[in-house]
Amino acid sequence: MKLAEFQLGALNALVGAILPGNKFYAAKLGEVEAFSSLSDFVERVPFTTKEELATDYEAHPPYGTTHTLPLELYNRFHQTSGTRGKPLIWMDDPESWEWILGNWEAVWRGAGVEAGDCALFPFSFGPFLGFWAGFEAAARMGVRAVPGGGMSSEDRLGLLERCGANVLCCTPTYAIRLAEVGEAMGKSVADLGVKTIVVCGEPGGSIPAVRERIEAAWQAKVVDHHGMTEIGPVTVSHEENADWLRVLHFSYHAEVIDPETLAPVELGEVGELVLTTLGRFGAPLLRYRTGDLVKPVAVPGGDPAAFVLEGGIIGRSDDMVVVRGVNIYPSAVDAVVRGCEGIGEYQVEVDQRAALPELLIRVEGGEAEAKGLERALRQAFGLRIPVVGVGAGSLPVFEVKAKRWVGL
């Protein structure tokens, strides 16, 4: 079955399953007849925004009205990170959770992970969805899943060695951090037997400089993945091109729009990713504006309705800073920093007190490293961005999503 035909059937099944029980979408959609085509769906269904969801949750605390079923049928509770405001609670019933796990299993298979492998999850489990689902999906498909919460980085490296894990699942930041901790201990992480590192939570896995730094330290393949608590697991690195993220198109109807005009962008142009969850009936989202900026490109010989994301998640529409007329995304700065030797952690201060924003970057390193990064930034962006060296260990260290930008 062609993708467009499958998605049309899935969209009609989705709307039929959630209405009229889902009060949020019943109010947005009214009485909806079957869609005749994907373009008909796009024309008749309005976008869903995070601001709408926040307003709904404030008006109907604590769970809002986005759930389709009675509350007593939900057995999974998660919430968003709240990076851009108050966290949103997102719940799943057993059927929707099975759909989530199925998508994560597709991520694991895309990474080449299979039954009999051993995967370490070196972080403390919080209320966001990602690592809970990744852990359960790995265990369900026969992977020996090892929890690594409540430990120091040194202890996690010891656990990694003892359990014989050949797969590591963490953020790009923490993969780099563990390598640095190992070096300080006189232990090369390249000798620990890890063959695959699945990274998520940050865009680094699709940034060549970041990916190459992790692969060089660990002598392992890096596979990128992205998802959201309110959406689920969405992408995994393409098997033939590490610079592409493959969208799970049979689980999501994906669009890419111009965030200003809201019109669809052409292939090869950057726009905002919009997603509809095709199988999460208990907690659905239709045409959800994710805020993630991506560049869709066609895969030669692939289904014409499918596309991949070149460069992964390029940035967020609300994270871009315009400095002296130049658009700067955190992911672009991260790529430059990770391409410079001798720099540990870093922090970017955004000064917006004047009419035009300015940046100051602090790095754990000496004067030579700071000056080298200044030169690299000038070459990348055509701007002089001041860089100040600070002592090792003086900047925050992150296990999950790094929050290096101050003042945004």
Image (tube, rainbow, N blue to C red):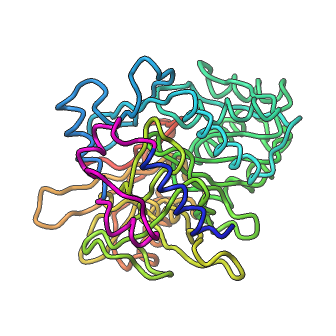
Would residue 19 be found to the left or right of residue 344 on screen?
A: left
Q: Where residue 291 appears, x then y in whole percent? A: 36, 57
Residue at (28, 41) in percent of width and height: 24
| Image quadrant where residue 118 sits | top right
Asked if residue 365 can be seen in this view, the reply is: no
Q: Where residue 185 appears, x then y in whole percent? A: 72, 32
Q: Where residue 44 appears, x then y in whole percent? A: 31, 65
Would residue 102 be found to the left or right of residue 191 on screen?
A: left
Q: Which residues are magenta?
A: 17-46
Q: Is residue 35 magenta?
A: yes
| Image quadrant where residue 45 sits | bottom left
Residue at (37, 54) in percent of width and height: 288
Q: Nearer the viewer, residue 272 or 97?
A: 97
Q: Where residue 246 appears, x then y in whole percent? A: 63, 63
Outermost residue, right side: 116
Q: Is residue 356 magenta?
A: no
Would residue 192 be found to the left or right of residue 372 on screen?
A: right
As drawn, 161 above or below 109: above
Asked if residue 382 can be seen in this view, the reply is: yes
